Image (cartoon, coloured by chain):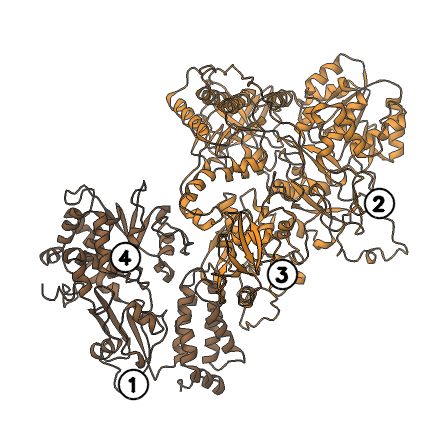
Amino acid sequence: MAKILIHGKEYEVADGQNLLQACLTLGFDIPYFCWHPAMHSAGACRQCAVKVFRDENDTRGRIIMSCVTPVAEGMRVSIDDAEAKAFRENVVEWLMSNHPHDCPVCDEGGECHLQDMTQMTGHVYRRFRFKKRTYRNQYLGPLINHEMNRCIQCYRCVRFYKGYAGGNDLDAFASRNRVYFGRSEDGALESPFSGNLVEVCPTGVFTDKTFRAHFTRKWDLQTAPSVCVHCGVGCNTIPGERYGELRRIRNRYNGEVNGYFLCDRGRFGYEFVNSPMRLKKAVIKNGEGGQAVSKEEALKLIARMIGMGGKVMAIGSPRASVETNFALRELSGAEDFYSGFSRQEAALVSLVVEVMANGPASSPSLKEVRGADAVLVLGEDATNTAPVLALALRQAAKNGPLKAAMQLGIPYWDDMAIKTATQGKKGPFYSAAPYATALDDVSVKTFYGPPEEIARFGMAIARELNGSLPQVEGLDDETASLAREAAAALLAAERPLVVSGTGSGSEAVIQAAANIAWALCGVNRQAFLSLVMPECSTLGAALIDSRGLDKAAEAAASGGFDTLVVAENDIFMRMEREDAKDFLDSFSNVIVIDHIITDTVKAAHVALPGAAFAESTGTLVSFEGRAQRFFQVYAPEDERQAAWRWLNDMTDAAGVKRLRWEILDDVTAAAASAISALGKLTQAAPSAAFRIAGQKIARQTHRRSGRTAVRAEEIYEPKPPDDMDAPFTFSMEGFQGQPPSPLVPRFWSPGWNSVQSITKYQESVGGPMRSGDPGVRLIEPKVVAAPFFRAAPIPFKARKYGWLLVPMHRIFGSEELSLLSAPLAGLTARPFVGLSKEDAERLEAEEGEEIIVRSGGKELSLPATIVRGLVQGVAALPHLPGISIVTLPAWGVLARAKRKAA
Amino acid sequence: MEGLSERPLTAMMKADKSAVTLSEYEKAGGYQALRKALKTGPVELQRIVKESNLRGRGGAGFNTGMKWSFVPMNAEGPRYLVANADEMEPGTFKDRMLLEGNPHQLIEGMIISAFAIGASQAYIFLRWEYTLSEERVAKALKEAYAKGYLGREILSSGFGLDIRLHVSAGRYICGEETALLNALEGRRAVPRAKPPFPQVSGLWGRPTVVNNVETLSNVPHIIANGAEWYRKLSRSEDGGTKLYGVSGRVRRPGLWELPMGTTIGEIFEEHAGGMREGMNLRCLIPGGASTEFLTDEHFGVKMDFDSVMQAGSRMGTGTMIAVDDRTCPIGVLRNLEQFFSQESCGWCTPCREGLPWVEKTLGAIEEGRARPGDLEVLEMHGASLWIGRTYCALAPGAMEPLRSGLKLFRGEFERHIKEKGCPYRH
């Protein structure tokens, strides 16, 4: 700690930071633009000027930029100094000299950092009287709107896009007062993190195009804290709603998870909630089609179905809340509940749970990922399966070079100097994948091969670290030497991290990853093992039950069941079509609760409209093992409700095995006491009874406009709906200040209307949220001898007439819900088969030519795409709609389709 | 050679302005300093140059030997030397003379300097418009390679050096040493954060020294003749001779190598011959466009770094621009600020947004469109675009003539505003 004097008063501040960080942490307001808590200091905007004085006799002082000045013991600082204030006002005046004066019609207005900073500096009158500079805007795709005239050239966009997220199609062009930020030509931004530009840009250059399509002012959005449902990372979000329509997603800072950033699947996938594929009414199958019925009618029918005392089987879902899955389990009894995994998923997630629960390696938070000083990625294409994890890994890759740069005396926050000193240098970062991935550019070296070869490579690394493990036979020299190199790098690190997961479809890969992490633990290292699972509560479901649908089908075939209840699961995506059909046919009654219309919903005798994440409250468990609560954002007008509540209503109506729950907390508590792995579930967030000064927290802002005017045709303002499940009101009445971190519905602070107000919610700038980052970790590593896996797979041999088809995940298209978001559907690739260059030649197929893929009795015709990194004899099948092969890797046969005669 | 002991930089140069050839250079003692240096050793070379009091001729005037001494000599990996030949300061043409007239002198200076800092790779970063320099330097480099002065093994010393000629894409800011390094790496020509200085983290993040062409051209002579000889060439504390130039409406515009510390009056009157018939000197900019105006009151001031600084300006590149009394001083300022505004890299706000405002305001005043408050706007910029408030020295440099001009030409400004137009345009 260092003591510094601000306006003559002494403050203790942490060493090693810059003066701007220190002052903001202390609660002082200093305006800034180019500095960003995650991307640090650039020194470009010159907005954060303050004055420092040499000693007590120095009365003149010196203006310095606080963001590039390290704090020093005894430093004398004045923020309010007249000269410093005048200069800060000058800076805003310069920035505003070319800025359009059209805040009332600007998408950013009301949550604009430039507006806030202009207010803060006191600049009101524009003396610049000459023509303003203007630019041509670009088309940047369906997600981001571009309005260059609003640019204040803070360089944050390129520093994020290129420097932080590794993109390469956005840059700064031209010079002097013509600097331009955009692409070399019009076109969709290629980075899967492009949506963050919306929050990174301090003004309205980059705005959310999906929000623009149903725009409303920030203060008219109803918001609540939520958790992203589009992958297993568990990024914290703030969805915003008005008039029953979900309008946008914003990042919700969680220092242990997503920090400041989301991926584009998470940010723009929300449109599925508004999609025509929503199930909004209960539907009863009658003859050919279905008939929409009221809630009461549906429940009456269901009461007959389950009230007779027949046996019920329940199928849950890895995309459903823990509470819904648990309620299903209570309905059917543990024996007859299945979480709804495919056979392959069940095998993989059971293994992951076993590794997490019984091994000595810790599952890292994303903050710990960002802090890792050596990384091995084994077989997981994280950019496509867990994008924000990949973003965190990209930061970890910088730690090695950063450490070297800091030895030259450069502070970590001096971003431009760090970039100069670290350029061209890569940290200890190794990866192994079946094909080239987006993280290859940060990898020192990448091993390419099919899953079994990746597993063997991993086993060889583990063997290097622990001589008692079996030798991997038959490795070529290059692979063996790479294994030695990677092992040495991991061993030399203080916080080594191994990343793998279910993405490769291979248990052997996960076992190899576990062995490496465990072997590192064996040499007194705090080793991290991050195992990716694909859906928002895969782990939550697996902790309740991890048997697959194959087992469910076996049980159903053995007879005795009358009724099947499925919640939020499309079993046609997890079983072969015929198997799924047979399975459903083995029940007299099929009841499906879901919020979207799936093939399973269509096959149901009774389909009940579930609530999407923004319409209900519940708990999800990320693959880190973090239980996090998402809260209902708005009350839908029709009968959509959480699946667990439907189940409660069903048993109520039937009068059987009554689920005695009134509110969500009852379900959560029951789950926590029934399943020991979920013991801490109730700690994910304060309960519905939580009050501040006797008040619930308001979902609506204190600035909400036209509350009564919009209902002017009615005499009375209706009472807002009650929310029994959460400590929030659907109203502007209620607590408007800072609640505990899991309950923060939006970021706002007086004078800070933009996302920059996050700083006011943190203990220190860029640090944890006040009262701790949200969520509770359910699984901690065991202090035990590692239960190593001993078997290494036999080597892969390319077949003469067959190809190993490996799964390939796509950020847009591989996830069920975001696929229903129209803007993302437009970015989803058409199905293809990925081939190595050699194999394409062998098949005499050009890029784009149709290839017939035969596997498991199916035949697909797909265009060929050359995929870098694939080894000969291995082809990649993307997980995209239209590709119906459920289990991959699998062997298949490829042939070029007959060319049509010219 | 005659004069070599008084005018080491230029005595060898030929009247027909063709380049000194390798054999002519060698005959006059060229590359002997290199032989001596290779036997001397890096640390000793650094000491000699430091003691010679050779100060950076690019304009900043930092002691060259001292600059070299900041290079960590024990660090592993490559180190670099860069010759800054991006001479783009308005009114400045001294490096051009050295590049065109005697490229081997520069090359020899670079080899010795590279040896002194342990660099095995060097670059000449050349201004795009200097096409004749490009031709001659490229030829000289070829000759030096052929003769074994460059390459893997220089004169059987065990020391090797590769020099590459890089022709800039052409921006004033590339003369700023860190922007130069960015440009050399193929990045945007934007200055870098300092510290760390290039000696620690420069080209590709490696220890790097960037020296001006004139600075490097002095090095062989210092090594050949010693630090004391060099210091004695000067009439002031700073060592050596200096290339002084005068442009503008003087009788004999030109460039002369004179002892460091020759007075402004002597350079202006004896060498440049004073103003042309019928014209009077209004003021002069002593060292390129980014220095404050001086007047005939300052004729007694010695042209060296410290003396000009004491007089309230900077020696800069040592090449003066004389402004006569028939030229509108507001137009002069506008012309200068137009240049700086156009050459801003666009990185920091004050420079990027402030300079165009200054330029436009000066334009409005000159053209009779002044408004109340315009002078205040100019004053504000003069105060606000200052050292420490901007990212690099470009904008403060641009403000030097403006700040002094606002004082010196107050009456002219008021006249323009009152008469709604330029009295010099009829």
Please state the chain letter of the residue tagged with numbered disc 2 in the rendered image. Answer: A
As drawn, the label of residue A721 is 2
Location of residue A188 with respect to A307 vertically, above or below: below
Please state the chain letter of the residue tagged with numbered disc 4 in the rendered image. Answer: B
Instruction: Indicate the quadrant where residue A653 lies.
Output: top right
Instruction: Indicate the quadrant where residue A668 lies.
Output: top right
Identify the secondary structure beneath mark 3. Answer: helix
Task: Name the residue carrying label 4.
Answer: B64
For marks 4 and 1, give the one nearer the viewer: 4
Horizontal and vertical percent position of residue A887:
60, 22
Relative side of A309 to B132, left or right? right
Identify the secondary structure beneath mark 4. Answer: helix
Horizontal and vertical percent position of residue A44:
49, 57
Horizontal and vertical percent position of residue A336:
76, 18
Identified by mark 1, the residue type is Met
| Distance from Cα at disc 4 to Cα at disc 1 | 40 Å
Using the rendered image of the protein, determine whether residue B222 is visible from the camera's viewpoint.
Answer: yes
